[in-house]
Image: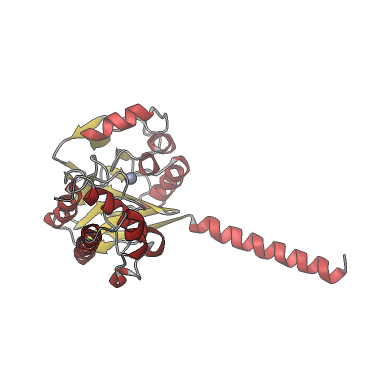
Amino acid sequence: MTRFATRSVLAIAVALATVAGAAAQDNYETTEIADGVYQFRWIGHNAMFVTTEAGVVVFDTIGVDAARRLAAEIRRTAPGSPLAAIVYIHSDADHATGAAALMEAMEAPGVPIIAHELAVAPIEARGSADQPAPTVTFADKLRFQLGGRWIELHYLGPSHTDNIAVPYIPDAGVAFAVDFASNDRAGFRDLATWYFPEFFDALSGLLGIPFETIVFGHGPAGDRASIQRQIAYYDDLTAAVRDAVEAGLTEDEAAESVRLDAYAGWGNYEQWFPLNVRGVYRWLAGDGGQ
Ligand SMILES: [Zn+2]
């Protein structure tokens, strides 16, 4: 190898190390959404936490590694504040794993784990030590006060699953919606676990909560107009797929031909829009066609 080549290899190695370092830092990000309300992003997932004078409430822990990083971020933003409670927004393991790791990292064993009552069965069936079962459940609405702050959990019915809690922090005007709404992004793949038509009521039900800012389980936060756009998207998607079904197109033909150009700039549109078409097609061509 010539001297020049050796240097080039070294230069490339240094460049790769720099990129790897930057990528590691980009794995997470903590953003103050409102006074004492934080979005914690871990790779592509968002959790939320709220600080009060009596401790911190965490909404989703995402995973074991995420929870350990989250503990460090809580200590950084709210030094000395104890962990008071964990809320599972819904039962899916990719959002609700890591509670045990968070309790351990924050030296707060046995804090309440709050979830919707229908989240218990799928979590217990999974039986993961990294996803301990909820210890406090609710059906329609749960409201509690901690350190002078009110925290509400709303249930809007089945949507992406049947057990999604929607937190709302009244004094900050912030809500948190996971996996059934987002800020200008298509739905997740073929909407396989979604409940139709109940999903539409849950989505519009968000607007019955008087939030100003809304954090999502994936992607950037939004506002009330974000939810109006989500409603318009799913209405337009349903109308377009209904036309395809009524025209006699097969699912493959519909996935190939249905387009909603107004949403072409949305996140994940290219990969997931044709799959969204398939999900709605299966509903409409099944029991939802009437
Ligand atoms: Zn989910």
Residue 155 coordinates in the image, percent (x, y): 17, 43
Which residue occupies 38% across, 36% down? 99
Residue 15 coordinates in the image, percent (x, y): 66, 65
Q: Quadrant of ligand 1?
A: top left
Q: Specify the quadrant of the image occupied by residue 67.
A: top left
- Is 122 on the left or on the right of 42, as rendered? left
- Is 137 on the left or on the right of 16, as rendered? left
Report the front residue among 51 and 154.
154
Colouring scheme, one of rainbow, by chain, secondary structure, one colour: secondary structure
Residue 91 visible in the picture: yes
Which residue occupies 28% across, 49% down? 282
Which residue occupies 31% across, 32% down? 122
Q: Specify the quadrant of the image occupied by residue 80.
A: top left
Q: Quadrant of the N terminus?
A: bottom right
Report the front residue among 115 and 150.
115
Residue 142 coordinates in the image, percent (x, y): 16, 40
Q: Relative to 247, does residue 50 appear above or below in the rendering?
A: above
